[in-house]
Amino acid sequence: PSGLLTLIAVFGLFLLGTLLPHGALQSEVEQLDPLAPLKMSAVSIFVYATPMLTMSQLGMMFDHGNSPGASFTLLLLGTGVNLATLWWIAKNFGVKSTAVWFAVLFVCVIGIAYAIDRPLIPPGVEPAGHTHAFDIYTNPLHSGQSVSIEKIGGILEKTIGLADWIGAAVLGIVLIGGVVSRLAFNQQSETLLNPTDAPGDVEFAEKGLHSEVSSASVGLTCLAGLVAFSIVGCFAYYPAPREVFEEMKYARTDVLTGVSSKDYTRALRYVPVLEAWTRRLEVGYAIRNFELRPYQQMQTYLLRKKLEELEHAIEHALEFKVAMEEGDSEAKLHYDEEMAEIEILKQGIVNSTPRLRTAFGE
């Protein structure tokens, strides 16, 4: 059953979160690490990721200058294979055949990953030394951090958006409806799904809307509609720069307000939101003007760089604050340094706004 397969796939993520400490993958897929593709392959087997999530992670890996071979391994094994896939193949084709198939797949993927690792390193991109793209596969809590309802609630609030809650609600409604239908209306449902008096060939006596349409015409119409809706969806998801700057204003205000009031939970919540709007600004401008100038790319990159450094500085400051409370004598010095860095980055984010508006003609 599909429900069981889903549970098996999600169980792989549970294993990763249990075995890997928080941030364990932040510096394990660097360009100069010869074991990066192998490390990523070991993780990817347990990963249950959608193509959209994997593509976003690939973009972050290239943006941070990580290993292209590890990126390729994540794309093939992370999206194409998980524990549920292996379980289903083994059940239908046998364990021996599955082992042979997976061994061939693994060798081919690793071989190609090492072959393209160095040639595909983007020119001019300096390795960042770390990435947060894979933090979702590790333990969400720091080592030694106490587990509480408030802490779990904060993590859920930070990681689960409105669309996720809506999807979970719809899934819950479907599950409840399925259980009720199964228990109370089983006979009626079987009758509807397997009618005994279904008519055979129907001859239409009227023309007009009852005309027969070839399968090729239906297929081409569906394909054209899919392309049209995709184009409309792109323009809807990536608004014009004027609308993006309006949304960025609200997100930037939340980030700066959180920093100024030392409400760092709020700041950390809206830093990824502001980063996402900078990317939508680039794409929205490009699909409307059919170009994206290097100066525009540089300004959005600089803002994202400041936001990323701000996020790291806040996380480090919070860690040093906990160490101070535990009596660490050296933590106070590091805490003051991080606080000074936070103030510098806050001012840098404020100063980047006029340059960004000028770059995009707003």
Image (cartoon, rainbow, N blue to C red):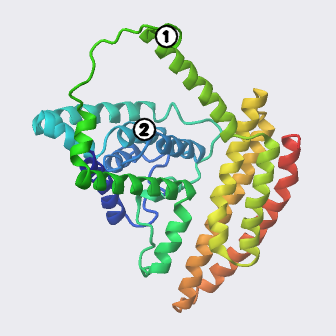
Q: Residue at x 35, y 37 (%)?
A: 80
Apparent side of residue 358 relative to residue 232 in the rendered image (left or right): right
Q: Residue at x 65, y 74 (%)?
A: 264
Position of residue 51 relative to residue 330, above or below, is above
Image quadrant in which the C terminus is located: top right
Q: What is the number of the mark on residue 217?
A: 1
Would residue 99 be visible to someone looking at this image?
no
Q: Position of residue 6 (x, y in %)?
A: 30, 49
* Kind of residue at disc 2: Leu
Of the two numbered discs 2 and 1 in the rendering, the one whose residue sits closer to the viewer: 1
Apparent side of residue 64 relative to residue 196 in the rendered image (left or right): right
Q: Position of residue 302 (x, y in %)?
A: 74, 51
Q: Position of residue 3 (x, y in %)?
A: 28, 50
Query: Which tag, 2 or 1, sits closer to the chain's start?
Result: 2
Q: What is the number of the mark on residue 75?
A: 2
* Kind of residue at disc 1: Ser
Which of the 4 image quadrants contains residue 102?
A: top left
Tell me the element at label 1. Answer: helix
- How far apart are the alpha carbons under marks 2 and 1? 35 Å
Task: Characterize the local packing of mark 1: few (<14), some (14-19) or many (20 or more) Cα atoms within 10 angstroms.
Answer: few
